[in-house]
Amino acid sequence: MSYPAIIGFVMMIVIVWVLLKQKTSTMFAFTVIPIIGAILVGASPTQIGDYLTKGLGMTTPVALIMLFSLPYFLLMADTGFFNGIVRRILKHINLSPVVLTCLTLLVAMITGFDVSITSIYLITIPLLLPFYQKLHMKPIILVFLTTVGAINTFDVPWSARMLRSASLIPNVPGGANHLFSMMFPTQVIFTVLLFAMAAFLGFREQKRIKKECATTDMTAGKVDISDIVDDPELARPKFFWINVALTVLVILALCLMPSVPSYYVFAFGLVIALAYNFPDLKQQNKLLKKYAASLLPIMPAILLSGVVVGVMQYSGMMKAMVNTLVKIIPSSMGPWVYIIIAVFSTPLMFIFTNDTWYYVLMPIVVSLMKAYGVPSDIVIITLFMNMGALLTPIAQPQIYIGVDLTHGAVDLSQYVKYAFIPIWGMSLVWIGLGLLTGAFR
């Protein structure tokens, strides 16, 4: 093993360790440790500056998209956009366990368009928990299906996961849209199977309730939507359909106009939405200050991840690490390394964080698979759905919010025991579908 490879592996292990043990912030790990690594391999200050410029150049567009996309969806939530959609769904259905489980998945997926795991839990669980209690259903199913809905929105083109992954293919125009389009056929089938799973869980609950609670009315009828309350100051019900139209146009622009920078599309949508929803400039500034808090420390961490990639890639460390791995891995297994890692991604996420998965591991595997002729985009979409992230609060601390919102009905250990096998199974199904559709080979 060469000296640059040793420094590279040690640097990666140190970053993983400090993030896993929460010894430092993500920003510190991404800013300081790579520079120490660059110094140890003998890089001059001029060379280090070049590494930083190239690395940050890869993540700047990603950070800019986050700068405008997150406030856009937070603004839509404040106007009652998501609540309005949920109200319109509930208004036209009769509730039963099967309907409620499918509805849980649907609501989680709808709220997931703002790419915030926190908001998915904060909206879906308090909204639907009273209905689970009314039908005597297990709240753990609500937490689990909310998590499943969050997982199924991992790959929207404006999510941090997708944007970070797209930065690994900087020469592909509209990289996030490109990756999304590659996964889309697989995801259509996967989504159908998720709703089938939700329906099965609802049917099983219905049988259990009929057996254990013979007096329970299994069809609760129409839902009282008056419990879904908007912010009285910020809600804009008269602009609901305008907000729907604008959001559809923004999404269409992202998909159909890859030559236009995605961050500009969201910036345009944000300023237009602010202009007609909140024409008072003082209120606009107040809202933007409020949304700015949600950008920290996520956006700086995304931006500074370019330091890690820049130093590893342009200092020669990553090439040396790849050469070492190529020599270690048997040639018969080499072309399948990324598939093997994907298969074990769920348990691996108990020792990884989202940051280390996307910012450290994925770039190395992408480089490794180039030696076997596997295109970068195929490796990225295969490793992308690290579903195990939503099993551990180390990778996704918002899980604590999800279980806490059940008011003691579910604790973290119960959730992990209940969800581990199904989520790993979902991951394996996802990989199988990708191989069958040809997306992952």
Image: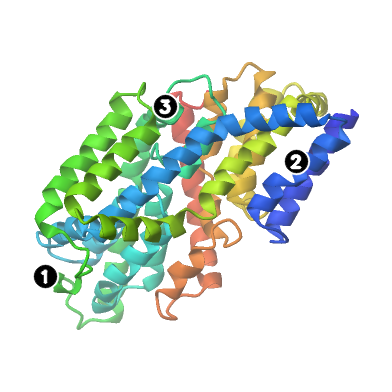
Residue at (54% x, 45% y) in the render: 386
Q: Earlier in the sequence, mark 3 or mark 2?
A: 2
- Tell me which numbered mark, 2 or 1, is placed earlier along the sequence: 2
Say which element carries label 3.
Answer: helix
Mark 1 to mark 3 CA distance (whole Å): 41 Å
Q: Nearer the viewer, mark 2 or mark 1?
A: 2
Nearest the camera: 244 or 265?
265
Question: Do the residues under discs 2 and 1 have CB atoms within 8 angstroms?
Answer: no
Residue most extreme to the front:
282
Q: For mark 2, does the 10 Å Cα neighbourhood hold few (<14), some (14 to 19), or many (20 or more) residues?
A: many
Q: Mark 3 and mark 2: span between their CA atoms? A: 32 Å
Amino acid carrying label 1: it is Gly
What's the residue type where badge 3 is placed?
Met
Task: Tell me if residue 324 comes above or below residue 125 in the rendering.
Answer: above
Q: In the rendering, which numbered label is found on residue 182? A: 3
Residue type of the residue flagged with mark 2: Pro
Image height of 387 relative to 77, above or below: above
Q: Give the residue at mark 1.
A: 221
Mark before the other along the chain sequence, 1 or 3: 3
Res. 96 image quadrant: bottom left
Q: CA distance from mark 2 to mark 1?
A: 59 Å
x then y, percent, for residue 136: 29, 77
* Residue tagged 2: 34
Q: Is residue 434 above or below residue 335?
A: below
Q: Position of residue 393 (x, y in %)?
A: 57, 62
Q: Residue at x 61, y 60 (%)?
A: 394
Q: Position of residue 168 (x, y in %)?
A: 57, 29
In the rendered structure, find residue 345 and report the number of the disc placed on it.
none
